[in-house]
Each structure stands twice: as structure tokens, then as C-alpha cells.
Amino acid sequence: MTSLREATTSSRILVTCGAGGIGKTTAAAALGVALSQSSERRVLVLTIDPARRLADALGLDGIGNDVTPVKEVTGPGELDVAMLDTRASWDSLIHRHAPDDETAQRILSNSLYQNITGRFIQSHDYIAMERLYELVQLQQYDLIVLDTPPSRNALDFLDAPNRMADFFSSRLLRWLTAPARGGIRGLAAKPFTQITDRILGAQFLSDITEFFVLLESMYAGFIERAREVEALLVDPSTGFLVISTLDEAPLHEAEFFIDELEKRKLRVYGWLLNRVLPASLSSPSLLLAMDELERSSLDDVATDLDVPLTHLSTVIKSLVMNARAWSNVAVRERQQISQLHSSVPLVAVPSLDGEISDLEGLFALGQRILDEPFVLEFGDVQRSESA
Amino acid sequence: MARPSLRERRLLFVTGKGGVGKTTIAAGLAQALANEGTSVLLCAIDNRSDIGEAFGLSQLHFEPQSVSDNLSLMVMDTESALRDYLRINMKIPVVTKIGPIANAFDFVATAAPGVREILTIGKLCYDVRENLYDVVVVDAPATGHIIGYLAAPQAINALVRVGLIRNQTDWMLEILSNPEKTGVVIVTTPEEMPVVETLQLLKKLEDETTVQAAAVVVNRTLSDLVVPRDEPVLAGLSAKRPDAFTSSALDGLFEAARLSGAKNTVAHEHLATLRQGLDDDLSVIAQPYLFDCADASSIVQAVATSLGEEIQ
């Protein structure tokens, strides 16, 4: 494998993951655009919360929970986009798994349910997996690019289906819901009930209990689905692209994520380093040029360009100052990259000028990500890029 | 009534979209206040926060650690907060480790998010009420999750009809609702999504919580100085390549100039959107892009210096 394009030729699911604020959603959209315009694949990008500008760039008036075709993509492939609406997906999940309408309604109107689906961080993770499964079942796509929620804990979303299953089969839940099912809590439970009663009030505890008893009716459905989602993730045609910038926190998150994915024997296509400064800014010849400029006489140049010497000097001075500032950062970035250790191929793409505001911009970024040569051995970054 | 300034407040929640440098600004703000002789507690909510690194601490604990005369650091831990809470407020003696109960509690807290949040908020408000520190600076959750914390007292009031925890929400609300005590500092960068989320958060703060915004910090602002201007001269240099500029690396200079120019154009557009959406009396603090700082400690010191000047 020499590039992401090669690594993903036969892939059916491509999951982008990493910390928040690193350009993950843009990268997912860019990959979707590039792959649908450079191959015959029918591609779906499932995103979380796209920026207005990104929706505009795709030529959409906003992206809904429903699948929307991107008409501006004219082939050879096709591109659809959908946004994950956590709340709507949860509601439809309840409707699907609930034994009857009445139970579904009781769950939907429970204040705890509204709290959990709205604010429970992991609920996004679970529902992303759920929606992915649903879309795979449609069999309408050759490739689904899944942009994952910005997880505080990178593991949350991988574990979500299992955690949900564990949750329903946990002893604690059985114990909590025992009275409602006609059983009794053992003596060991006494301190807990005493404390929770005093802190939370008995009413609250019984609200919780009622809610879980209702949810339990859907237990089998959840468990089964969790297994199916897991099978989807370990399938050889599924792979992950871990994304980060060179900032400390996202970098740690990426290292941690790669480690965990490999532990779970999941396929990692590569590690995309986003918003890296161009290599030219860290090149030794730039530093030389700056010294040269500061020493050279500008008289002739001023005459040649027909501007006053003092003005030219000011402009040159600011040019040099600006370049020094960026080159400091760029040199630091190269050092940082050369010190990275990872078992997966690395793809470094530069920060693009400005922001992407149209389909061509997304296409260009996607192509760049797909075709940038993989750096397989760490410490080789400088060499391969200057070659 | 005029909006109290950042320095007048005693409980500051620093939030922002992921990736904007929220933690760095929280650390810099705490350091800036400590530099002025104020006693400061800096509290990280996320136990994976690397905020301690900048102060030479490899590990943060619930028990505050002092890093200088005026500055202590801690990380929130709901189980410890619960233990404190039971001991102080409920007079429930915690004889042994509350391990199994804590597990059960954790379970309930996960199921009903308000519980975890109220313990966190409760602990922070308690430190303010008891005057343990002059100021508590919180490296708070990102924009998407902060409302859950700030609105926790109301959420608890809605969910829990009776019980001791409910009685506790009143004094917390009193501290949170008082703009002379509590404020939110929203960190953004001059980019699209961070600005969008900042404006969304401001609206949510108003609609769903009683907490007031204290300031917006625009991180990674390029100063106009580093953006080379005068297009005609640049174009002339580029076209004519006078002999003095033999090195082909003149391209590097132009590349750097283009980079600054492009970033600046984008920044101006988003800053305009930001200012348009803000109340006039909400202060906007520009935090310059730090080109020269490499390690966490020097970054925090630099931020402290420039924030210190801004909040005078």
C-alpha cells in the first residue's frame, strides 16, 4: 500500500475518527467527493454536524437526517450525504424495538428518556453505529464514509454497542428493577437505597426504575443489534482513518485511538495529519534566503520596481518577519512529526489557503488525502517530502 | 446594569469548541490572576486533561495541589465530590470506602446525567461560597456539553421532586445566577465553526441557564504586523525577481505571506460575524497566535502575560 487510495480500493466502510476541531468532518466530505468523482463508486457520507459552509460547498440547503443526493457530483460515481440527528434516530429506534405502541409512547414521554438521549454523551456514539448499520442494510452504497462524533473518550463510540448490551444485562439493572418485576432487593441493597432515597428522593429512584423496566422490554433487540454492529466493524472491508492535527491533545488522542483499534484487531488505513504547514516553510534554503535578504542592498531593486527605498525596506522587513514566524512553527512541526511513533502509515496534508467553500475545493483536498504518498517509516517524513 | 468585568467574578467557566485552545486559555487565565496576587484554584473537569503538564504536574488529584503561592490545581472526580458532599451536607458518616455504593451511584448518575453534573457544580460553588479561594477557574467541558453542567440545578429541580439534593440547588443557583460571582469565558478562534458555536452557546446560556457570559477570547489572532501588505510591491517583486533575490526560496517568503494573507482574510470575515452577534458590552479579548512557544509551560506563561494586560 502506498496511498490511502490504494488502501481503500475495496473498502465498504471508512470511519474517520479523532478529537473535535481537527477538520474531521471536512475530511470525510472531501473523501466522499473525491471518491465519487474519481471512481464509479456510489458513496454516502454520514456526518454529524456539518458547518454551514460545508453544506453550502456540497450545494445543499442544510443536511437532514434523510439521505440527500449531492447533485453537483456528476460522476462517474454518485454521492449522497446524510446528517446524524441523534434525537430523531433514537425515537425511531424506540419505535422499532418496542413490543407495542403503548410502551413506545411511554418511553418517549419519560423525562429520563429525554434527558438521556439529549445529553448522555454516549448516546451519540451508540446511535451513530445504529444508523450506520441501517444504511448498510439498504445495500445502496459501495462505500459509506462515517464521520464519528467528537468523543471525549475515543473508545466510547467503539464500545457503544457493547456497553449498551452490558448495560441491559448488568446485575445492577436487574437488581434496580427487581421490585418492579415482583422480586425483592437483597439486604445488601439497603445502604444504597437509603442513601439514594435521602439524596435523590424515593420518587426519583422509582422513576428510574420504571424507565428501565420499560427499556428492558427492548433488551433482546438491543443485544442483537449490538452483535450485528460489531460484526460490521470487524469485517475486512471496514477500516478506520485516524485524524489529528499536531496539537498536543488531538495527537495524544490519535495515538491512543490507533493503539486501541489495533488491540481490537480493527483495520487502520492510516493516520492523517491535518493542517501541517507546507514543507517549503521549514526548508533550510528559506532560512538562508531570509539572511540573504536582510543583508542585501535594496537600492537597485527599489529603482527597478519604482518604489521609494524606505517603503520597499518596510515591505521586505515584514515579509521576512512573517516568514520567520511561520518557519519557526513549521520547523517545530517537522521535528514533532519525525518523533512520532506509530505502526500505521502516515499521511500529512498541509493547511490549505483559506477555507473550503466549494465542491472543487473539497475535491482537491480529497484527492490530496487519497494520493499523498504514505510515510511508512517514521522519521522519514522529511526525506520523502523533499524527494 | 453594566456587565461586571472578568476580574470582578469569582467563578469562571472556560469553555469553547474542541481544538480552539480552551485548556491553554484556562491555564493562562488562572496564572494571570495568580500573578496579581489573587488566590486561584484551577479545576479541570475532564480527568484526561493535560492541564497539569504546563505547571510541572504529571498527575492531578481531587485534592488540590499547590503549584505556586497563589495557584492550586485539581481535577474533578464525582466519587470524591459525592463523599465530600455526604460528609459536609448530609452529615452521613462515611465509615468505610463507599466503593460498592459508589459503583451503584455511578450507574444512576450515568443514567440521569443531572446527578453527575450537579455534584461537579456543587463542589465548585461550595469552594466559592466558603471563600476557600478568591477565584475558581474551571477548565470546563466543550461548548457541546457545558450547558448540561450550568443548567444542572434546574434539571435536578425538574427531575427530582423531593430529597436533600433538591434543597441544595437553591444556594447553587444563587451563586451561578449572580453575574458578580459567576461568568462564562468562551474561547474561540477566528474560524467558522468555533464562531458559530460561540454564538450558539451565548444564546443557549441565555435561554437555558442563569449564568452570564463574562468575555469571549479570540485565540490565535494574527497581528496585522505579521501580515505583509502592499500587494503592488509584492507583485513587482514576484514578477521581476530582481537580481538581489537570486535564491529560489523567495518562493518560501511568498508562500508564508500568502498563508498569513489567507488566514487573515478568513479571520476578518468570521470576526465580523462574531462581533455582529455579540452584545455590545461583552468584551472580546484577542489572544495572539504564539509563533515562538514550543512547550506547554512557556505557552501558558505567554498567555498569562498577554491576558494579564488585557484584563487590567
Image (cartoon, rainbow, N blue to C red):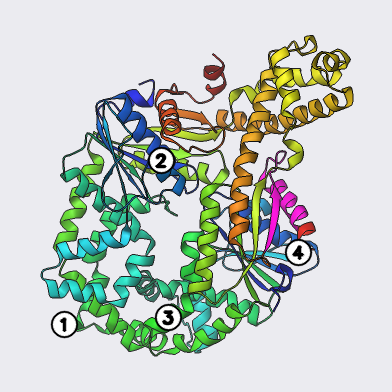
Mark 1 Cα-neighbour bin, 10 Å: few <14, some 14–19, many ≥20: few
Contact, CB < 8 Å: mark 4 with mark 2? no
Mark nearest the camera among 3 and 4 is: 3
State how far apart marks 1 and 2 are (Cα).
44 Å
Question: In which quadrant of the rendered view does residue B309 lie?
Answer: bottom right
Kindly identify which chain the residue marked by label 2 belongs to.
A
Task: Please state the horizontal and vertical placement of residue A279, each as a whole percent of the image.
Answer: 59, 24
What residue would you read off at disc 3? B156
Dot label at residue A259:
2
Query: Helix, strand or loop at disc 4?
Result: helix
State how far apart marks 4 and 2 are (Cα).
39 Å
Contact, CB < 8 Å: mark 3 with mark 2? no
Mark nearest the camera among 3 and 2 is: 3
Q: What residue range appears in magenta?
A: B283-307
The residue type indicated by label 3 comes to Ile
Kindly identify which chain the residue marked by label 3 belongs to.
B
Which residue is at a point 63% across and 71% down the rendered structure image?
Answer: B183
What residue would you read off at disc 4? B34
Dot label at residue A183:
1
